[in-house]
Amino acid sequence: MSNYVCVCVDLCDRPKNTNVRVSLPVVCFVWQTAMVILFGVFIRYNAESDVRWREFRRTNNISSDIENDFYFRYPSFQDVHVMVFVGFGFLMTFLKRYSFGAVGFNFLIAAFGLQWALLMQGWFSSLDTDGKIKIGVENLINADFCVAGCLIAYGAVLGKVSPVQLLVLTLFGITLYAVEEYIILSILHARDAGGSMVIHTFGAYYGLAISWMLYRPNLEQSSRLQGSVYHSDVFAMIGTLFLWMFWPSFNSALTDHGDGQHRAVINTYLSLASTVLTSVAVSSLFQKQGKLDMVHIQNATLAGGVAVGTAAEFMLMPYGSLIVGFFCGIISTLGYIYLTPFLEKHLKIQDTCGVHNLHAMPGVIGGVVGAITAAAATETVYGKEGLINTFDFDGDFKGTTPSRQGGMQAAALCVALVFGIGGGIFVGCILRLPIWGDPADEDCFDDQFYWELPEDEESVEPVLEYNNHTIRNKNVYVSNLYLICETKQLCFVSNTFLYFQ
Amino acid sequence: MSNYVCVCVDLCDRPKNTNVRVSLPVVCFVWQTAMVILFGVFIRYNAESDVRWREFRRTNNISSDIENDFYFRYPSFQDVHVMVFVGFGFLMTFLKRYSFGAVGFNFLIAAFGLQWALLMQGWFSSLDTDGKIKIGVENLINADFCVAGCLIAYGAVLGKVSPVQLLVLTLFGITLYAVEEYIILSILHARDAGGSMVIHTFGAYYGLAISWMLYRPNLEQSSRLQGSVYHSDVFAMIGTLFLWMFWPSFNSALTDHGDGQHRAVINTYLSLASTVLTSVAVSSLFQKQGKLDMVHIQNATLAGGVAVGTAAEFMLMPYGSLIVGFFCGIISTLGYIYLTPFLEKHLKIQDTCGVHNLHAMPGVIGGVVGAITAAAATETVYGKEGLINTFDFDGDFKGTTPSRQGGMQAAALCVALVFGIGGGIFVGCILRLPIWGDPADEDCFDDQFYWELPEDEESVEPVLEYNNHTIRNKNVYVSNLYLICETKQLCFVSNTFLYFQ
Amino acid sequence: MSNYVCVCVDLCDRPKNTNVRVSLPVVCFVWQTAMVILFGVFIRYNAESDVRWREFRRTNNISSDIENDFYFRYPSFQDVHVMVFVGFGFLMTFLKRYSFGAVGFNFLIAAFGLQWALLMQGWFSSLDTDGKIKIGVENLINADFCVAGCLIAYGAVLGKVSPVQLLVLTLFGITLYAVEEYIILSILHARDAGGSMVIHTFGAYYGLAISWMLYRPNLEQSSRLQGSVYHSDVFAMIGTLFLWMFWPSFNSALTDHGDGQHRAVINTYLSLASTVLTSVAVSSLFQKQGKLDMVHIQNATLAGGVAVGTAAEFMLMPYGSLIVGFFCGIISTLGYIYLTPFLEKHLKIQDTCGVHNLHAMPGVIGGVVGAITAAAATETVYGKEGLINTFDFDGDFKGTTPSRQGGMQAAALCVALVFGIGGGIFVGCILRLPIWGDPADEDCFDDQFYWELPEDEESVEPVLEYNNHTIRNKNVYVSNLYLICETKQLCFVSNTFLYFQ
């Protein structure tokens, strides 16, 4: 006689509706149309990208086309561009079933964000006397930087929000960034070449605050998907390496021509190299058998680049960069081991990518290092002219002293923190509205709700659960048939088998 | 009693022979030998890459080594190089079992094509008075551009042709390209910075015409392989992103030093950003549940870069670029949804990668936008000097008016179309000869015919088909055992099981 | 009645202990601390990256910031950086279960090596009168070059050593490299732009000699892991393509400003293109059915870049580059087919990545080509000034003749060989000490001993072996149940099935 083992696929009733067929197209079309109109009203080419450049050259006595800012900054711009789209995008593909969302939504919000950033930053920084924003390669880099802040925030909420929520997060994030950046760079006159404060501290706390507001008490129902598989970890290493390699370009993209860019590259290069060794050391030390953890290699190795962001253009000295990287590698790796679980358990902050360890802490360290090195700057080291050029003690800020500059740097760090946390709480409230199509707690980290997936590899679901009692009395001794099917085919094999017990 | 279920692997008799062991090596050796001889006769270094550069500098009163064209164009060249080899190569890895062919044959034909392109383009454009072609970084970029046209054509026939056919396609494609480019740029004096017409329109229609000539009525027999799997879609995103990020370098690589390159970058950057949002919107709008389709994200998001190719160096204005991208994203995505199935069903054009949507339509749009913006150019916007410089109204073309230039641009678009379609039909006829080792209709999109595959993951074949009648009378109720084995192991399990019924 | 088939997982007793929980952190911390101290004592910014650059500019009458060496070399530097971290890293991911080790340990040793290289090379080449090493972008490139030598050596021992051994290999490798480089470039005054001798010949023979010293007679016990799977081959192509595309930057990164960099790029570009065609031809010719082998496409296609390294800056002529590439593609591919098995069988050199074919032979060819082209240099081709500039016949070497230079180049090649083989044997002896935590012969090529692997895809182990005798007398005709489980799930299915025989 045959027994039939009922294959019960327990599809929980899903109270949440992830259908974004109306909201996503509407938001995209409305915002892109708004961009066209606002660009039509406000945005024009600057002197170096306008057809009147030759005139400008003659007027300003510029001897050659090669002096166009384009040739100083374009290679760095492209590296930053790669970091934003491939670096951040692929770093987040580590989840086993959220690679489409990682790289695809990263693409979407970056493409939207950079347009909005050109406008917001333009209104604050590049507004010409004729009421137009004049853009060139420097503005493109700034827009990419601004977007990076929002992508960091995305890392904290990865897999738990809908694309519409991400667009809202980006719209507000860019806006807050532009205001915060204006206060820090123009009003406080702080220096922040690689954005330790402006980008990383702000972006990370913005994302963490949103994640706190969107706390999901039952997220462990998605725990089967909250991990990596072998090849998704290799994909993530593509992101890690492009971030790591191009970080010197990130920190030097907007620094002074000549020695400013040159020095920022050297400092960042060294800090990053140092971080790799201490991350590996701590990762090995805290694991059974001394095995390395891919999460640390993918993330903590980058902390040195974040932490050297503010001071990269200063006379930090090569050994200074190594020291910054040394400690950041340790702190960031320990953060992944101890702090992320603590934050989730006790502070109800669920931080998917561990941005607190990779961006928040190193960002704050970077701000502090920047304040100290600025305050400690002396004419002996910098020379009279070097001091003025490096810290831009000119115009309204003529005569500022290094110690005062150090204070301003510290104040800037506070501004970044306040904007990040405050802005995140505010935007988090908005994102809690039940209209954005976010997934239920048991459906997080799963591409199938927002993406058409290829047919033959569907989402990882427990298809078959073994009913112990049915088989106990047969000539069958099954100890533990627990089958999670990855492919339809496997299921059928098992079905067949069980039928004829 | 045991029943033996016959495991019948239905290997269809294959009338076509995919063995290229003679033809592929012969073609490679003959052509590479020809390249060596022709390079020996014709190709030399130009003044800026020759050891006499210092002399040249003094003679021409060039103040610094940094004025060598190398420093203006090398970063863009490397970006274009990445687009050609990684961009196009990985974009085509989306098929589940044709990744080796996508990235490997892309590599092969690009490496061959760029040598032939240096010669062909050299004969038409860089031939010196001494009968030698003098090459420098600009020629390398031009060769990469030329190759891009053939790689676009490859996209239309991906998975359906043999490597020998691809080499023939490339040999003729490069030749046609060089003639077409000469007519468009030198005779008609049209401008086409990013090659909307010269590269994309020509390349796409060339490939589509070939695909039409090679129509396979029974291609649905390969339909099990004509789709993606989860990780092959992630690989394809590597291609998409590198194309997307570096497209500004593509469109600016050969434009004027200074503002020309600077402006082309800005226009392309903005057009691409805009395309992403409208592609996402349309993709979501036309799918059940508002889910996004990876095919659209991988392809349609790039249409804006194609369409802004011709006009990128003009004073298109930032909002103009956004508008071009806006509509191209919509049109390209709709093309994937409606036009590709239509072309296959009614016009017998099987377009594997949808190059009609990504290159043909946006290329034509780019040509039209170029013609309109050229015709509409005024001295108010460009200035007298700017108008002459931008459109190169000099030498034989002194005194050309913008409206006449617009006409020439439109004529150029027609030339590209005629060369693409005509050339494709001609080359398609050649490729129909039964000597090239192309696969049978049921063997398309399968790497196993041209590549040694790793042992443990062989091609996806139905290995075991369930014989309902054999088991019907046993104590076994098998409802639907349909097993497609991906790994040998799985087969063995099933075999074993079935034996002892 | 049920029979119980004993599932015997034959876990061989492992005499070797791969626990590196003490040694790896200790080595990392000690060495990184040493780096901080040594950098503090020795390393400073050079004139072009120091804040006093503006003063330097005025003193040296440099007209613009764009003349800072940074702008001549930074784009090439970033390309080299990508080759070192992504190129070498991903090229080695081809093994089915060693991708973490390939890309992760590559990352670790490169990050350590570049710091040590800055010191070692600095002591030999950049030591200022004040006892400090002054660094700039050129030093960063040199450090990356130096690291590349050690990464080549890693290719020979991939999968067979522990991370601690790799750090030791790197420490000594960098030291040997710096001495060898000093002898070749400064004492012998040989030219070696792309390091055919200094980097490739040295690195490859260093690795091969180590591999010979660490010969593993029972390595075939790991043979199940010493191959690729479909997607690991695609990952490896990422490495191949980034190496291939950026090789022109590698060979030109340190050549003379102006025509020197320009010419090196053209020569390398052409040589590589030529190699692809002959590699494909030979690969197809020597395989049944003319199928291509991914190993050849991934590796042999790069040989042309290695072989043109020394002569890239010379007046090799475009056809000369094609010829070099032509023969290297053939030789390298034949090496993979015939020489690698021969080396393993008869010389006891186990060369995981085939570095003998990709680096050693092409490196030697490159040295020979360099010696010949240097000896054959004439004033007719180079001009009087060009000859002096290209070969740096200045200072102590004023009046050297081309033929003498050719002799020096040949001597340099011998030096590289002696340092590679001798150094490798010496370091190999050290690495044979039983304290480094290397894996047993049957555990090679397996990430699980040094990495925490994701839970659901554990290492490929034979879990179940079929006991023929147990089942022979049942109504069961199992011919060959040999099951290697890739996933736990599959094992359970089989277990269950077998229980109820």
Image (spheres, coloured by chain):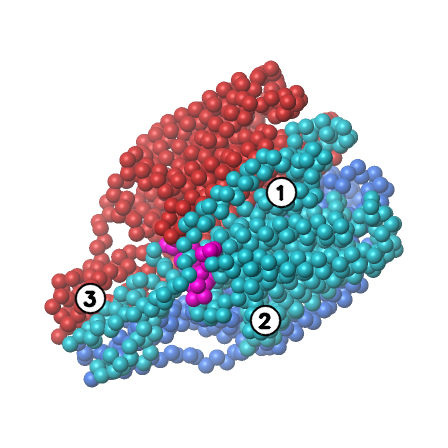
Chain colours: A blue, B cyan, C red
Q: Which mark is residue B119?
A: 1
Q: Residue at x 44, y 39 (%)?
A: C330
Q: Amino acid at mark 2?
A: Leu
Residue extending farthest left? C473
Q: Which mark is residue B142?
A: none
Provide the secondary structure element on which disc 3 rests. loop
Count of residue discs = 3
Q: Write down the chain letter for disc 2.
A: B
Residues A95 and C102: in front is C102
Instruction: Judge from the rendering whether residue C188 lies leftward or rightward of residue C26; answer left or right.
Output: right
Image quarter in which the N terminus of chain C is found = bottom left
- Magenta-tinted stretch: B435-454
Query: Is the residue at mark 2 from the same chain as the one at mark 3?
Result: no
Mark pair 1, 2: CA separation: 36 Å
Along the polypeptide, which appears first: circle 1 or circle 2? Answer: 1
Which of the image's four quarters has the C terminus of chain C? bottom left
Chain of the residue under the numbered disc 3 shown in the image:
C
Residue C497, given in percent of the width and then of the height, sits at 23, 70
- Per the image, the residue denoted by label 3 is C478
Out of B68 and C277, give the one closest to the viewer: C277
Residue type for callout 3: Val
Residue that carries the numbered disc 2 in the rendered image: B347
Looking at this view, is C292 or C472 the one in front?
C292
Q: CA distance from mark 1 to mark 3?
A: 63 Å
Q: Secondary structure at mark 2?
A: loop
